[in-house]
Structure formats: structure tokens, C-alpha cells
């Protein structure tokens, strides 16, 4: 068996066209243009690329983007002052603080300072708490993108056993909460670095989501023939190439469907940020 590719690039284009149409309608009917403020502290090259890509995507769908670039020695209180200003700025519907922040700034303090109605990353305890309570508001972008990839490719999720490798607050944990929501109805197992017999668990899965940040970790012998594989990993190899958390060439021979890296989950993450910003503007 050779797996079908779950093409995130293509789906992102389709969904971005849908978002662009809604943005245009919002502008026409209510004179309202959604706006996203991106806050970048320091000169981390990867963060600069992420923010640039997010702003380009905003431009493409007609969302206004405002870039706030601050030097690496910005103090926590200066950053909090900026966030407070953005929280009350009526042209800004979503606030994105690019992580990681410099070590002298407490990330949790900053994430907590973003107004819940502008938390388009879905990282705040407020957004995560609502999700855990079964009243989801802003879904974290990467997990939401994964759900869209599955659903829009007609992968059965209800009743499926999904094994998620990774329990971070931005991927594994919110993904597990999303998949177990009523209406999504997956049976979810969450694994982490202390999990025992990981391969037994992954082999029992209908769907495996690898989100641990270790290149080519998930091998073919850890996957049940016919399983669906979602690769969240983005690992830069010494030769400069990008690798996922899945041994793609081997696993694609046994899986029924698989996301590539790049071109799988990554483009969906940006798309769901645009989606959340649109929702935030519509809620105005
Ligand atoms: P974190 O480092 O925050 O979390 C990694 C998780 O994986 C932890 O829960 C850790 O366990 C677990 N883990 C690590 N090693 C193992 C192991 N050997 N076996 C089982 N579990 C393990 O990473 P993120 O969640 O932020 O990101 C994961 C990957 O996804 C990275 O490659 C990142 O670049 C990528 N990513 C991609 C995005 C996209 O848009 N495509 C967006 C966000 C992330 P423990 O909790 O016990 O330490």
C-alpha cells in the first residue's frame, strides 16, 4: 500500500479562498476589515520568517496586519504596555505574540495579558479552559488545522482511536481536547516522554499524530497497516533540510494516508490563524 497524501498546501489554499470571500463580505456589508497585530521581540531568524509568512497570508486574504518589532532587550513591562494598548485598539481583532520570547520575559505572563476576545492563537488559559469545559471558542491553530485536514479529507474521526505523541500546550494537549469534544468523538490516547510501550500504543491506533520534535521518530514498525499518519514535526537537519517526526518514506508504504513535511500541517496552522482573526472580527 502507498499512502494517499493529505495535502495541507492545497487545503490551505481552498480555505484561504473561503476566508478571503468572508473578509470581503464583512468589509462590504459592515465596513469592517479584520486586523491582526503581530508582536515580534528580538531577532530570532525562525520567528522572523514565521511572522513574515503570517503577514503575507493576511495580505492575501485581505486581513490588515500590523507588525510591532521590538528589540531583544525590551522589558516585560514595556511588552505588557504594548499588549494593553493592542487590547483596546479597535482596528486590532487578533493579537499574535510570536514565541519564543527572550528568556528575561515570562511567556505565561504575556500570554495571560492578551485579551481573551483577541487570543487568536488560542494559547491562553481562558481559551484552553473553555475547550476543556466543552465550550470551545478560539481553537489553537495547529490542532485545529489537523482536525480540518482529517475532516476535509473524509478521514473518519468519530469513534477512531487517535494516539497523539506529545502533550505540549500548543499542539498535543489542545489537540487531544479537540478530538475528544462531543461531535468530534475520537477516543484519544496522549503519549509523552515518560510513556511506556509507546510502539504498542501507536500500533493500536487508527490515527497517529506525531508532535514530539524528533526527526523520523515514528518508524514503519510502529504503525498498523492502513493507519492514518499526521506529522506535525518540523526539525531542521544538520544539512539544512526540514524533516518531520515521521520516517516518511518507510511509513507511507504501510499507512493509508499521511501528511508530508513540508506541505502538510504547516500551511494549515497559518490558515487557522486567519480563520480565528476573521471570527474575532465578526464577533465585534
Ligand atoms: P514541545 O517540545 O513543546 O513538546 C514535545 C512533546 O513531545 C512533549 O510533550 C514531550 O514529552 C514529547 N516527547 C519528546 N520526546 C518524546 C519521546 N521520545 N517519546 C514520546 N514523547 C516525547 O514541542 P511542540 O509541541 O511545540 O512541537 C512539536 C513539534 O511540532 C516540533 O517539531 C515543532 O517544531 C513542531 N510544530 C509544528 C507546527 C506546525 O505548524 N507544523 C506548529 C508547532 C509545532 P514531555 O512532555 O514528557 O517532555
Image (cartoon, grey):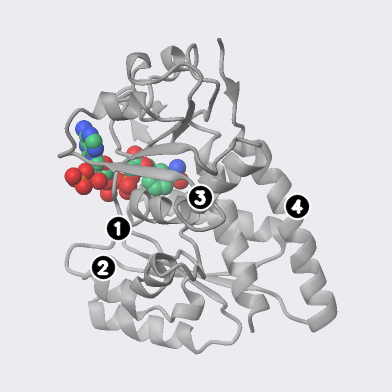
Above or below, 82 relative to 276? below
- Image side of residue 260 versus residue 21, left or right: left
Residue farthest right in this picture: 28
- Asked if the residues shown at circle 2 and circle 4 are in contact, with their CB atoms under 8 angstroms apart, the answer is no
The quadrant of the picture occupied by the N terminus is top right
The disc label shown at residue 107, or none: 2
The quadrant of the picture occupied by the C terminus is bottom right
Residue position for label 4: 17
Residue 239, quarter of the rendered image: top left
Residue position for label 3: 185
Q: Secondary structure at mark 2?
A: helix
Residue position for label 1: 100
How far apart, in angstroms, are the residues tagged by discs 2 and 1? Answer: 8 Å
Q: Earlier in the sequence, mark 2 or mark 1?
A: 1
How far apart, in angstroms, are the residues tagged by discs 3 and 2? Answer: 32 Å
Above or below, 77 relative to 182? below
Nearer to the camera, 201 or 251: 201
Structural crowding at the residue carrying mark 2, measured as other residues with C-alpha within 10 Å and reported as few (<14), some (14–19) or many (≥20): some
Q: Is the residue at mark 4 in contact range of ligand 1, meaning its CB lies under 8 Å from it? A: no
Amino acid at each position: 500500500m502507498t499512502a494517499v497524501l493529505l495535502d495541507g498546501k492545497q487545503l490551505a489554499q481552498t480555505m484561504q479562498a473561503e476566508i478571503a470571500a468572508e473578509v470581503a463580505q464583512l468589509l462590504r456589508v459592515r465596513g469592517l476589515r479584520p486586523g491582526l497585530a503581530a508582536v515580534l521581540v528580538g531577532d530570532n531568524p525562525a520567528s522572523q520568517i514565521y511572522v513574515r509568512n503570517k503577514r503575507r497570508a493576511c495580505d492575501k486574504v485581505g486581513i490588515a496586519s500590523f507588525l510591532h518589532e521590538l528589540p531583544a532587550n525590551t522589558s516585560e513591562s514595556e511588552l505588557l504596555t504594548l499588549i494593553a494598548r493592542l487590547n483596546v485598539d479597535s482596528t486590532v481583532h487578533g493579537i499574535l505574540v510570536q514565541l519564543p520570547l527572550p528568556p528575561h520575559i515570562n511567556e505565561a505572563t504575556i500570554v495571560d495579558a492578551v485579551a481573551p476576545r483577541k487570543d487568536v492563537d488560542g494559547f491562553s488559559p481562558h481559551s484552553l479552559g473553555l475547550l476543556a469545559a466543552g465550550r470551545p471558542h478560539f481553537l489553537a491553530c495547529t490542532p485545529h488545522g489537523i482536525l480540518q485536514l482529517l475532516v476535509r479529507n473524509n478521514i473518519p474521526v468519530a469513534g477512531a482511536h487517535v494516539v497523539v505523541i506529545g502533550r505540549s500546550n500548543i499542539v498535543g494537549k489542545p489537540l487531544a481536547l479537540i478530538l475528544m469534544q462531543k461531535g468530534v468523538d475520537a477516543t484519544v490516547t496522549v503519549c509523552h516522554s515518560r510513556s511506556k510501550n509507546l510502539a504498542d500504543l501507536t500500533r493500536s491506533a487508527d490515527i497517529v499524530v506525531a508532535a514530539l520534535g524528533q526527526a523520523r521518530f515514528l518508524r514503519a514498525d510502529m504503525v498498523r497497516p492502513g493507519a492514518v499518519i499526521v506529522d506535525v514535526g518540523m526539525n531542521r537537519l544538520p544539512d539544512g533540510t526540514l524533516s518531520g517526526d515521521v520516517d516518511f518514506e518507510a511509513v507511507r508504504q504501510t499507512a493509508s494516508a499521511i501528511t508530508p513535511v513540508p506541505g502538510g500541517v504547516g500551511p494549515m496552522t497559518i490558515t487557522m490563524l486567519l480563520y480565528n482573526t476573521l471570527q474575532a472580527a465578526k464577533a465585534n
